[in-house]
Amino acid sequence: MDAPRPRPYQPDGGLPARRVPVRWELAHDENFRRVVRRGTVTAHPEFHHTVHVEVPHLAPDRVFHYRFRVGDWTSPAGRTRTAPVSRARVSELKLAAVSCQAYADGYYTPYAHLAQDDVDVVFHLGDYLYEYAVNSVGNHRNYTDRTLPAVFDHETVTLEDYRLRYALYKSDPDLIAAHAAHPFVVTWDDHETENNYAGDTPENTVPPEEFLLRRASAYRAYWENQPLRRPQRPDGPDMRLYRRLHWGDLAQFDVLDTRQYRSDQAYGDGARLPGPAVDDPARTMTGATQERWLLDGWQASRARWNVVPQQVTFSQRKLDLNPVAKLSMDAWDGYRASRRRVLDGAKAAGVDNLMVLTGDVHVGYAFDIKDDFDDQASRTLGTEIVATSITSGRDGSERPANWTTYTTANPHLRFYDGRRGYVTVALGRDAARADFKTVPYVTRPGAPLTTAASFVTEVGDQGLKPA
C-alpha cells in the first residue's frame, strides 16, 4: 500500500476508515541490527488510528530504539528507555520538566534544545495543547507557504476538534524531535479540555451533561495521542491519570491529577482575597481517593527522593504587598486545607526529601516549601521547581513587571524568571541540582539556550541554595 500521508487538517488523518495492521520493532541499536522484540498491532479508526504498544518483561535500565511499519512505509526511529527495578540501588537520574506550549504563541525552540539534552525522562506537566481558536492572523509562526485552515479557527469542543488540534501540535518538528529523543511522562492541566475547569464544573455556564460530553471528547483524544497505557484509557468522561513510578531506590514519582477531582474554585476564581472557603476542609484539590493514595504511597516509600509531578503552584504565592494579599484561587493557595493535609501527610510519613514539579504559570520559579509559609523560621519541608512554558506567553522577559513585588512578598521564593524554556533536575544520592534553561525569544526561530540559574538542595537538609 502507499505510505500514509497524514496532514494536520485532514479529519481522518489521511487514512481510510478501516483497521490497519502496524508492525513494530524494538532494538538495542538505532540501526535495528539487534532487534529485541517485534510484533503487530491493529490501528483502529475508532481510536483515530493511534496505537499503544506495551512490551512486557524488558531488561531494566536500558536504552531501546523503536519504529513502526505500515505497508512499505517505515517510520523514523524513536528512542526510549526502561527504568531500573524499584529496589535497585541507583546513584543518579536526570529529568526534564516542561509545560504550556500554545502553538500560536511561538516556535518550539526549547524542544529543539531539549532533544539534544542528555536526560533520562521528560515530565510534561500540562497544557500540552490549548483549546482556543487558532488562525493565521496574529500567529507568531511564519506561514508564508500556506495559511492555517479554517478548521482550527474555533474553540475545541468535539472529539474531532481535539483530534485535529493534537494533529496540528504534533506536526511541529521540534516537538517531534523531543518525543523521538526521550520518553515522556505526561499529566494534564486545564487547557487540554477547557480553561480553569474544576471537576465537572466548566468555566462557562453550560449544562453539566454538555460539559461532560466535551470532557469525554478531550480525555479520549488525550489518551489517543499521548504515551499512556491501557489502565489510563478513559471511560466516558472519567480517566484515571494519577499513577506511581519508580526509578530504582533513588526516586518515587507520584504523578497527580489536580483537575478532574477538585472542588470548584473559591470566590469566582482568579486573584482574590482569601476567605473561609480556602481553609474549608471539605474542599479538595485532588479528591479524597487520590489524596489517600498519595499519603499511603509516601508511607510505603523507601525512595531517596519523593517527587510529585503536578500542575499548579503548590507553594504560597502572595500576589501583592498588602497586609492581606490576594492569592490565586486556581492554585493550591485556593485549597489551603487540602495543601495542609498533604504536608502533614508528608511529615507523618517521614518524607525528608520532597520535591514538587509544577507547570501552568508560564514562568520559572524555585520555592522552599515551608511548614508555615507565613513563618520563615518554620521547617523547610521540601522544594518546588516550577517549569516555565515552552511558548505560552510569547517571548516573556527575564524580570516581569511584578518581579519585585513577588520576590518581596514571598521570601521563600528563591528564583523567578519570565522567559521561555524548560528545567532539568539531576537527582543524586546526596543532593539534587536544578538548572533553569531559557531562550530569549520564541516569536522567531533559532533562539540560543542559556542556563539562567542553578540551585541545589541536599539530602536531609531541604532548601534551595545557589549552585
Image (cartoon, rainbow, N blue to C red):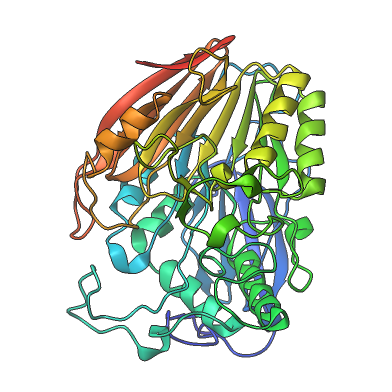
The reply, left or right, for residue 261 in relation to residue 308 is: right
Viewer can see residue 189 = no
Outermost front residue: 323
In the image, residue 24 sits, relative to residue 31, either above or below, namely: below
Quarter of the image that includes the C terminus:
top left
Q: Position of residue 249 (x, y in %)?
A: 70, 21
Name the residue: 64% across, 90% down.
Answer: 17
Question: What residue do we see at 41% from left, 49% from top?
Answer: 361
Residue nearer the viewer, 106 or 237? 237
Q: Position of residue 52 (x, y in %)?
A: 68, 62
Please tell me in which quadrant of the rendered image residue 309 appears: top right
Expressed as whole percent of the image width and height from the top left, the position of residue 165 reads 47, 75
Tell me the quadrant of the picture where the N terminus can be found: bottom right
Q: Residue at x 28, y 52 (%)?
A: 109
User: With 416 as the anchor, is 156 left or right in this view?
Assistant: right
Does residue 42 appear anywhere in the picture? Answer: yes
| Position of residue 97 measured from the top left corner of the image (x, y, whole percent) | 47, 41
